[in-house]
Each structure stands twice: as structure tokens, then as C-alpha cells.
Amino acid sequence: MNTQFLFDSTEVVLTFSGLTAITGFKRKLTIPYSAIMSVQTGPFQERVTALPTGGVSLPFYRTGRFLHNGKRTFMAYSKRHSVVILELASSSLYQRIVVETEQPEQIKQELMARCQHL
């Protein structure tokens, strides 16, 4: 997956490129640290019945918007064991974000350090 995490003073910016940006219909997500309720790392257990509302849903490849367990979710992964899972405030555009990264534990530690409320 082509996802980059850019850490700003008040928010994290996820940028998507290549096939991820095209199939997920999204090039950038901006998430205020104050909206992050929890940070977890893979494996992501997904119900097969996650309903796509804009994106691509293939076995072991998800990008785009989904309705997963009643939550508005943005997914961008092909390896469900190497993801960062962000639970966000209910007032956010997405209530959950699941993105693949080569360094999930490092991303988690960086987010935990910047989210003083966690």
C-alpha cells in the first residue's frame, strides 16, 4: 500500500498514492489528534459483509469507504496483519480508519505520544 503518515503539531495527515489513491477515491485524510479515541495495530478482523459505500472490495484487498459493524470506516490495506486501526470520535467523517503500513508499531507509538488524552 502507498500510504504515508505526516505528523503535524495538531493533526496527522495520511496521504495515499498510486493504486490506493485511485481505488479508494481519496488522496488525503486529515485527522485531528483530539478526534483519535484509540490506536491499535493489526491483525484486523473484518466481517466479510462489510458494505462498500465507495471503493474496492476484493478478497484481501480493501480500499475506500465501508460500513463495518455499523461504523463509517475507511480502509486501505492488502495485508490485514500489518495495519494501524484508529477509532475516532463519533462526530468525525469516519468512525474508524484501517490502513496498512510497513511500520505499524512505530506509527502507533508516534500517535500515542502525540495524543495526550490516550
Image (cartoon, helix red, strand yellow):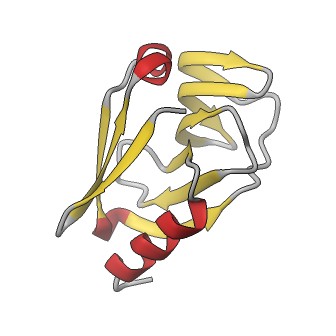
Which quarter of the figure is the C terminus placed in? bottom left
Q: Residue furthest left?
A: 9
Residue 42 percent across, percent down from the top left: 71, 57
Q: Is residue 17 above or below residue 105?
A: above
Residue 4 percent across, percent down from the top left: 38, 44
Q: Residue at x 20, y 62 (%)?
A: 8
Which quarter of the figure is the N terminus placed in? top right
Q: Residue at x 32, y 77 (%)?
A: 114
Question: Left or right: where does residue 96 sit relative to residue 17?
Answer: right
Q: Is residue 69 above or below residue 39?
A: above
Question: Left or right: where does residue 105 sit relative to residue 27?
Answer: right
Number of disc labels: 0
Question: Left or right: where does residue 41 sit relative to residue 1?
Answer: right
Q: In the figure, residue 73 lies in which quadrant?
A: top right
Question: Left or right: where does residue 90 sit relative to residue 43?
Answer: left
Q: In the figure, residue 15 lies in which quadrant?
A: top left
Q: Is residue 115 above or below residue 65?
A: below
